[in-house]
Image (cartoon, grey):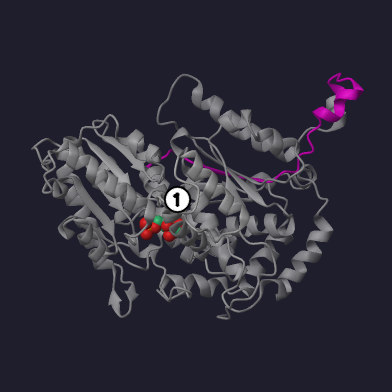
Amino acid sequence: MNDTSVSLTATPAWHDLKAHHQKIHDAHLRQLFIDDPKRGERLTVEAGGIFLDYSKNRITNETLRLLVQLAEQCGLRYRIDSMFRGDRINITEDRAVLHVALRAPQTASIMVDGENVVPQVHAVLDKMADFSDRVRSGAWKGHTGQRIRNIVNIGIGGSDLGPVMAYEALRHYSDRSMTFRFVSNIDGTDFAEATHDLNPAETLFIVASKTFTTQETMTNAISARDWALKGLSGDPKAVARHFVAVSTNATKVSAFGIDTENMFGFWDWVGGRYSMESAIGLSTMLAIGPGNFRAMLDGFHQMDEHFRTAPFEKNLPVLMGLLALWNNNFLGAHTIAVLPYDQYLKRFPAYLQQLTMESNGKQVTLDGRRVACDTSPIYWGEPGTNGQHSFYQLIHQGTRLIPCDFIAFAESLNPLGEHHDILMANVFAQSEALAFGKTAEQVKAEGTPDWLVPHRVFDGNRPSNTILAQRLTPEILGRLVALYEHLVFCQGALWNINCFDQWGVELGKALAQRIVPELEVKTEPALGHDSSTNHLIRRYRKLKGTPQEPV
Ligand code: F6P
C-alpha cells in the first residue's frame, strides 16, 4: 500500500479501535494480569540488547491486533521504505530524510539524487576521527603552542541538545583530562559561566550550526571570537587554531573567518534534531574517542535495521509508537513522562523534547488539512529517583493519566554498595504501584481510619513501559536514541503529518528580529505592536534607562 493520504480516522481499524476502546476502557490492569498470569512475560519484546516490557499498558491482544492493523492501513510499511530509500518525504522543504545514512556501514549504498551518499558520510567521519585524535593526543596545538584541554560547543536546538545529552550520557567513557562545555542560550550568562574559568590558549570552540545563521549561535560565536582574541593578544590568526565549524553552509563559515579546512560538513537531508551522530557530534567524538563514537553509530544502525525489517508485532519502535498513539488518541493521555533511572541520562528527557515535539507538534496533514485528532503528546521527565520526590505524586494520584517510560540498566557504571539494587528496586516498585495501585480495602485492612482511607487509595491502572538493557554503553545509547527517533516517525506517519519540518519556530524568530532594534535604538521608537507588547517594550526601555519620549 502506498497511499499516503489515507486519513487515520477514516480507516476501518480506527473505527474498530474506537468500538474496542468502548468495550475495554474500564478494564483494570489488575484484572488483565489475573486473567493472563503470563502477561508480564508475553507482552515483551527484545531487540539488540534492548528489552521492552509493555505489559503494563491498558491493552489486550485485540488492542494490539487492531493497532497493527491501523499501522498497515495507514501505509506505515510504505512510509518506512520511503524514508530508507531516500524519497523526499520532507515535502515542505523538498528534502530527503536520511539520518539513517549517517550510521550506515561503509559497504551500504544509499542514493540521493543519483549519488551514493555513504562514502561522503564516511569521509566526514574519517576527517572527524583524524581531528579528534590530534586534539586528544595533543598534536593539535593552540595559537601559543599549548595543547587544547577545553572544548566549548556553541550551538542550539539539535546542534546542542544531542551533543550535550550524548556527552553526559557517555561521560564514563570520556577523556577526563579534558573539559567539555556547551553554550546554547542567547542569555550572556550561558557564555560567561561556560568560559569564566577557562584559559583561551587551551580552549577550542566548535561552532555547530546547520544553517550557520541561527541568531543565538552566531551571537555566541562572535562573543567567543572576541573572548578568544582578547586572551590571545588579538592576533586574528588565532581563530584558525581555536575555532572549528560544523555546518552545511561553507560560505557562511568562511565569512565568519573559519577556514573551511576546519569545517566538518553534513547535508540538508539531516534534520537538526536527527543530527547528533553526524559531524554535529564532533564534541562527542572528542570526548569519547572515534572508536566509541563508531560503536554508538553501530548501535544506531542495529536499531535502524530492526525497525526496517522486523514485523510490526515484534518491532520495538513500531510497538512503542502505537502504544503512545493508543494512550494519546484513545485514552486521552496528553503527556508522556520519560524517566531514566540512570544519572548519566539526565539530559535525555530534554533531548527527547526537541526530537518528539519539534517533529510531531503539527496541526496539519501532509496535504495541508487540519488533523482530525491530537498529535504529539508532551514529553517531559527527570532522572529517577529524583522525580519520585517531586512530581510522581501527580502521576500516582492526580486526575490526569500520564503514561511513563522507565529506562534502566542491569549494571551500574559506578557500582557503589547497595546503590544499584536500591535504584532498580525503585524502578520496579514505581511501575508496579502505577499499574496495580492500592484499593480502599487494602488501605482499610492496614488499620487506616476511615476518614484517611480516600487519601491513601491508589487507583492504579496507570500505564507504563519499562526499557531494560545490560549497561549504558555507546552502542546502547545509539540504539536507544534510534528507538525514539523511529517511534516518533511511526506516530507521525499514522497522523499523516510532516515530522521533519519546523515552521512553528519561525514566527517568534521573525518577531524577535523586528524587536531587537526597537530595544537598542537610543531614541524612542514608534511601536506598531499590540498594546501589551508596546507597553512591555517601553517598560523594558525605561528599566534599562533608555529615553521614553518621542524625539
Ligand atoms: O529551533 C529551530 C531549529 O531550526 C532546530 O530545528 C535546529 O535544531 C535549531 O534551530 C538550530 O539550527 P542550526 O543548527 O541551523 O543553528
Q: What residue type is labelled 1?
A: Leu
Percent coordinates x, y for residue 361 in the rendering: 58, 60
Q: Nearer the viewer, residue 390 or 199?
A: 199
Read off the residue under disc 1: 519
Q: Which of 201 and 407 is in front in this view?
A: 201
Picture quarter containing residue 322?
bottom right
Question: How many marks overall?
Answer: 1
Q: Residue at position x 68%, y 36% from top?
A: 432
User: Vertical placement of 336 versus 414: above or below?
Assistant: below
Q: Provide the residue span drawn in magenta.
A: 444-473
User: Vertical placement of 425 versus 41: above or below?
Assistant: above
Residue 275 can be seen, yes or no: no
Q: Residue at position x 37%, y 64% from top?
A: 270
Residue 192 placement, left or right of 71 = left
Percent coordinates x, y for residue 358 in the rendering: 52, 58
User: Vertical placement of 128 versus 423: above or below?
Assistant: below
Work out which residue is located at the far right of the displayed protein and give it.
450
